Every structure is written in structure tokens, then in C-alpha cells.
Amino acid sequence: MIIGTAGHIDHGKTALLKALTGQEGDRRREERLRGITIDLGYLYASLGESDLTGFIDVPGHEKFVHNMLAGACGIDCVLLVVAADDGVMPQTREHLAIIELLGIRRAVVAMTKIDRVDETRIAEVHLQIEALLDAGPLAGVPILPVSSVTGEGIDALRSLLIEQADDVRARQQDGHFRLAIDRAFSVTGSGVVVTGTAFAGRVAVGDELVLSPSGRAVRVRGLHAQNQKAQEAQAGQRVALNLTGDRLSVDDISRGDWLVTPELQAATRRIDIEFTLLPSETRELRHWTPVHIHLGAQDVTGRIALLEGECLAPGGHVHAQLLLNAPAHVVHGDRVVLRDQSAKRTLGGGRVLDPFAPPRNRHRQARLAVLRALAGDTLEDILPGLLPSAINGLEPALLERQFNRPRDTWRLPDEALEINTRVGPRLFERGTWEYLEQSLVAALQRFHEAQPDELGPDRDRLRRYALPQLERPIYLAVLEAVLAAGTIEASGPWLHLPGHRVRLTEEEEALKTRLWPLLEAARFDPPWVRDLANDLDVEEDRVRHLLRKLSRIGELQQVVKDLFYPESTIRQLASQVLDMERQSGVIRAAAFRDQIQLGRKRSIQLLEHFDRIGLTRRFGNERKVRPDSALASEPEVR
């Protein structure tokens, strides 16, 4: 268990820990000279149980609340200290508000300095403390009168803390390892050492980790857990790690950085949270207010964007987005505390819902519905409400980082469906996926009704017509599914429903019989529409209309305006392009021109057509074949 102190300056927090553990908390020369705690102090002692308990002594002065927050982020139980002579003071209230915002629900109150007051004053302060706690989640916690000078009540306090340790719920150990760094220093002969509280997972000597948010790779050379040398440490412990890395120095690490496994490395600057403004605030909080944001041991400036209105009254609750001025590491469920721009008072705080918040459409009702679904505690609680709104599916790798839940620990709901796409797997609700398939088929039916003379759209035109809201890789996955099921068919680049065909009239069939030999005889240099019309003594518009119709049927391909190639000729050219790519790795325009014995302009027009239909990728004056092209997979002449 990790116990942290809280309370007003000079209420005896450090002296109380010395009475409990026999160890001195203020070890810095300046702290001893001034008689106050300035930065975090760390003690380890056995209260009578088998394992050592870690103690974090926090400063009580209002100027050092940022240090208090860095230490309070990882504690299991708070030891709230109130001096009997002073009673409840401003930092008592602020520290208590911070503890409540951090979600710490295990506490003991020590009323110190009872040797300085009489019984009447002790009873009076006891009532003050009860009144302070009654309005919040810590109502009813034990209040023990103690004296660090005489030792009165110390044994009873120690026994009570042991009981608290027995009830502390184990932290998440099946997640990836993450530790909030609150100190970094150099040890002669060892190198860089960092300390902090392990929030999740396990770590062992030799493990490869990442410093977040910088992304710098490090290796664990040695470690101490709860101030004892060990080979392994786990969530819930105070851990010191001796790190090694390429040119790693203490200057590369700051308080507020994290040590995480590589799977968790994904820094963010936008975070969606559920936010509560403290009732003690005297004025409303306005949208886009500049604030200090405390995440773990990190203190970063930024702004708060209210997602439901332009202002929030004291005691109000709202969804909000935090825009950070520096990158941060955070996962779903982490607690955040906000202080004002001058860092003189605590405004409020809440819980992280989405560590990777979107920059657009954050005020829309659909987005707010997603945030309401994210209010659950576990991934299993959240997925049933999240899947129906995920029109583009949910990315498992992002969920793993967002919730710090390794993929092999998930229990997917029955309605979840995992679909492989060109950008990796995505999770869909079964009903959503079926709706997408049906929408594609229905849209194609509408297209046929509106354009009966066309065989069908190509795949990108159908996407714009049917499902423009889908990411292209997701749309292609839906299309591949309906093609595999036979619900939609493809004729060349054109998509159509089974049985749908574009029919030529008798007059068009007769004209086709006359012009087709001219197109085939010319091979790689077919005549233009104008030349065909002159040769056949037919109106130019009639020839153009027929060629376009044959193109929609899939018998011709239009390379540029008024220039059409038979499908078989295009296949021959594609075969040559593929042979050239296999031999040299690229298709050079000059080499292609020499091979087909056409002019430079026509050769470029053909290569640009291959770009459009997906056969090649452009690289300056060179091209490479696309491996997923239909022509690349069927290069033979037909």
C-alpha cells in the first residue's frame, strides 16, 4: 500500500510520519532550515504487516500544491492531517478537494497536536472535520486524535492503517506496464535512476521500455520495489529503476514523464474528459479558459473547451476537451485536476474518457453520445454502447492503448464482428456491418434506375454515391464482402447488380459491326472518334455515343476524350507493362514508348490511364505496378 499525506502547512504531517515510521521525512537542507516541506518526501516502513508500506509526504504550502499533486496521483490511501490548534484551514480544503477529484476513496484523518489543546477544543475540531467531510465521498472516515510529541494515539493510528492495507484493492496487473516518474537523478557507478508509482502491469530487469511522451527507448538495468532490491515490480508499488539507453542522461527526463511498454507509446495533445467544477468556486468557468492541467505527475498548461454550452456554474458537471500545450501520456480512466492560469487555486477535475480526442465535430450530438458510452469503467462495459455508433469500426490497436488492455484479455460482446481491412482489423457491430452491405446494394439499385444506359459506376464513384462517410479502406472491405457474396458483380472496372446489362439497340449493333474491325486493326493506335465518323460516313455524335456506351459495358476503355481502346488491346498493353516491371522493377515512360512504337504523348496518356484504373503508381517519370490491381492479378490477354 502507498499512503500519502495531505493537509495545511505546519499541521504536523512530517512529524506524524516520523512518529509512525521512526524516519525523518524532510531530508533537504533548505527544508530543515525553513522548517517546512517543499518537495515530495518518500519513506518506507513496516507498520506491523509483512510488506513494507510506502509513504509520500507532500508539502502543505499553497505555493507547492503542484508538488503535492505529483505525489498524490499514485496513492492508495490518504492520511489527512488537521492540527487541533488551527482546525480546518484553506489548504485542508484544497487538498481534500484534490483527493476527491483524484478518485481516492480510502482515507484516515489524523487530528494532530492534541497535546497543545484541551478536550473542548478537540471536540470542536472533530465537529469541524466531520462537517467538512460530510458533503463528499469521504464522509464517515475514521478521525483519530494523535500527538507526535507524546505518542498518544499513534499505535491506534498504525493499527487502523494496517486494516486499510488489508482492504486495498490490487491494481491492474494484466495491463501493459506504466509508471509515473516523479524523480530522476544520477547515481555514481549506476547512471540514471527514476522513481515513481507503478500504475499498471509488471516490469522486470532487462525489460525494454519507452520514455513517454518523447518515445525514447530505454532498458531496465536494475530496480528496487518498495525500497528493496528486486528482479520484478508490479502495479501499486513505489519503484526505482536504473535505466540505460543511447546517450541517456538525467537531462532527458522530467517529472511528469512516464515509463511505458512500447505498446502504450502514443502521446496526445487532445483529451476528452468528464469535468466537475468545484462548488467552492465563486464564478462560472467559461469556454476556452486557460488552465494548468495535472495528469499523473505532469503539470502542463492548456485550455479547456466546454462541449455543452459556453459556461459552467460552480458545482456543475460537463463533458469537455483539454487542449494541451505539450504532449502527454494518458489512458482511459486516468484522473485529471485543473488549476487556474496562475496556479493559485484548484478549479476542478474529472476522469479521462478519450485520450485521443478528435479535433473536429466535438460538439455534435453523435460525439457526445460516444462520450456518454465511454463513461463506463471497463472495456467490456463500454463496447456495447460504443460499437453501434462506430460507422468506420473500432481499431483494436487503438483500443488497446486507450484502455491499456492487451488484446488477449478482451471479452467481446456477442454482437461484435471483427473485419480485416487494408489498414488492419476493425470491430463492428454485426447490425452496423449488415446495414453497410445493404446500403451499398440499395444505392447501386438506385443508380441503375437513374442511369439505365450505364453498366454501373466504378468503385470510387459508387463510394461517393452510396457511402461517402466511410473511410476508403472500410468501404473497400464492404465492397469486397458483397462481391464475394455475389450480391454485386464486377465487369472490368464497372460494378453492377447480377443480371443488369446495358443493351445495344439494333441500330447500335449494326454500327458496332462496322467500326469494331477498325479499332482492332489499328492495335495500339486506334482512330479517334472524328476519324471513325469520317471513315464510316456517320455523324460524330452517334459514334461518340456508341463508344461511350461500349465503354460502360466494359468492351472499351476511354484513355482520353474521344480515344477508345478495346478491352483486349488494353490487356495486351497491361501485359507489356507488367513484363517491364518484372524485369527492371519500374516502368519508364521512354522505354514504354519505344516498345509500343508510339509517340511520347500517346505513351504518357496510356500510362496515366493505367494510373487512373489502379494498375500503376506514379513516381516522378517512373511508375510501379500496384499489387492489388485487377489488371495486375489478371495480366493475360483476353
Image (tube, rainbow, N blue to C red):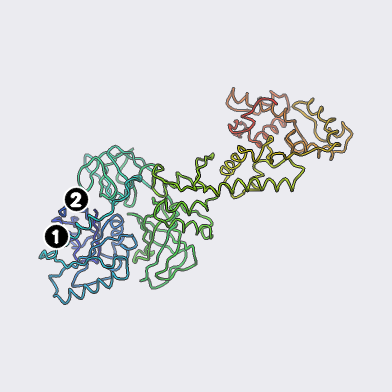
Q: Amino acid at mark 1?
A: Ala
Where residue 631 sits: x, y (%)?
A: 64, 31
Task: Looking at the image, tell me whether mark 2 or mark 1 is earlier in sequence order.
Answer: 1
- Is 245 displayed left or right of 570 in the figure? left
Left or right placement of residue 393 versus residue 160 in this view: right
On the question of residue 41 being in view, the answer is no
Q: Nearer the viewer, residue 115 or 292?
A: 115
Residue 26 at x, y = what percent? 19, 57
Observer-side mark, 2 or 1, equals: 2
Circle 2 is placed at which residue position?
52
Residue in front for this viewpoint, 254 or 305? 305
Contact (Cβ within 8 Å) of mark 2 with mark 1: no
- Vertical placement of 269 versus 342: above or below? above
- Binning the other alpha carbons within 10 Å of mark 2 as few (below 14), some (14 to 19) or many (20 upward) gives some
* Lateral position of residue 558 relative to residue 129, left or right: right
**Percent position of residue 441, x then y:** 65, 45
Q: Residue 273, can we see it?
A: yes
Image coordinates for residue 371, horizontal then vertical, percent: 47, 57
Q: Residues within 10 Å of mark 1 (few under 14, many from 20)?
A: some
Which residue occupies the extreme front position in the image?
414
- Identify which residue is drawn at 17% across, 76% down: 121
Q: Quadrant of the C terminus?
A: top right
Q: Which residue is mark 1?
A: 19
392 versus 281 height, above or below: above
Helix, strand or loop at label 2? It is loop
User: Label 1's element?
Assistant: helix
Please name the amino acid that badge 2 sits on: Leu
Residue extending farthest left: 150
